[in-house]
Image (spheres, rainbow, N blue to C red):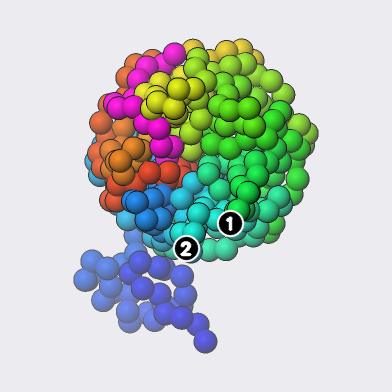
Amino acid sequence: MSSYPTSTSASGIWQLGDIPLFIQDGAWPTPLIGDLAVFAGGANPATVNVMDYVIITTLGNAIDFGDLSVPLFGVGGLGSSTRGIIAGGGNTANNGVNTIQYITYQSKGNTTSFGTLNSGARVNNTGTFSNSTRGVIGGGEGASPTYPLTNIIDFITIATTGNASDFGDLISAGYTLGGTASSTRGVFAGGTVPGGKTNVIQYVTIASTGNALDFGDLTTVRSRVNNGQVSSGTRGVFAGGLNVSDLSSNTIDFITIASTGDATDFGDLIADTSSTLGSGSNSTRGVFGGGNSNSNVIQYITIATAGNALDFGDLTVGRTYPGGLSNANGALS
C-alpha cells in the first residue's frame, strides 16, 4: 500500500482533495531552492543524528533538514548538485560504520541507504570530495578495538545507489584529512598518519582510478582539517585543525587546484579549533560550522579573496565533528 505524503515529505501518492487544504494551511511541501550547505551528525557531547542546512548566499541561522539513520560523528560528506552523500562515521559506541547514506537536497528529510564502503568501517573523518558524477572517499580509522588506519581510497557513482569500489591508495594510511576538488582533480590534505600529524597534500584525477600523488604541503602540520569541500573550482581551501603541538589552529590555507605546489596562507578562523569543522561552499563563498566546545558558530569566507572568516549565524545544535556537504561547490559546475 502506498503511503500518504506529509508536509515534510512529498513522496507518495497525494489525494487531490488534500492539496488545496495543505496549501491553505501553509503546509504544502516547498522544494528547497538555492546553494545549500548541510551539516550532518557530530557530538554534543553525545553523538547526534542531526542534519541542518544554510543557504550559502545569505546570512543567518541553520534550519533543520532531517536526521541521519543513526547518530554518527566524523562522517564524510560529498555530493552532486541534486544528491548529498554521507559516508562512514563513528557511532555512539565510538565504533566505525561502513554505511553510505544519501539525501536529496531539494526535499528536506531523513537519509536513505545508498550502500556500503568497499574497505569496511571508517570513523574520524575520511577525506572526501566529488565532482558532479563521482564521489571519492579516502583514508580513515577502522573498527574498534584497534582502530587501524587505512590508505584505501573508494569511489561511488553518485546518481546510482550501490556499494563503493576501490579507487587506489593514499600516499600513507591516515585519517582526519581535508578534501577539496575541481571538476577533474581531487585533493586530500593534512591528517594523522602512523608517524603523527602531517602537512602533506596529495591528489588524484577523479575520472580515473589510481594511487594519490604528491601535490605539496600545507602551511602548517595539522590533523582534523575541515570536513566538506570548499572550492571555487579553481581554488581550494583548508581550515582549522590540531597542530603538531596538539594545540587548536585557526589557520586557513588555500591552493590552486590545477597547479601542484605548497599551500598559501588565506587568513584566520574566528576562533581556534581542534575539532573538525563541517564545511561546504558554492563557487564564491565557503562556510564552516561547529568546532570546539560544542560550538554552534557558522562562519564564512569569500573564496577568491584572502582574509579572515566572518560570522554567518548558528547551527541548530552546537557540536564537534560534523560532516559537511554542499550542492553548488565549484567542482560541480
Residue 97 has which mark? 1
- Choose between 302 and 23: the one closer to the eye: 302
Does the magenta portion include 274? yes
As drawn, 295 above or below 112: above
Q: Which residues are magenta?
A: 265-283
Indicate left or right for 169 with 65 as reference: right
As drawn, 98 above or below 197: below
Question: How far apart are the alpha carbons under marks 2 and 1?
Answer: 10 Å
**Do the residues under discs 2 and 1 have CB atoms within 8 angstroms?**
yes
Does the magenta portion include 98? no
- Choose between 79 and 67: the one closer to the eye: 67
- Around disc 2, counting alpha carbons within 10 Å, would you say few (fewer than 14), some (14 to 19), or many (20 or more)? few
Outermost front residue: 145
Q: Say which element carries label 2.
A: loop
Q: Is residue 51 visible?
A: no
Label 2 sits on what residue type? Val
Q: Quadrant of the C terminus?
A: top right
**Tag 2 residue:** 70
Pick whichever of labels 2 and 1 is earlier in the sequence. 2
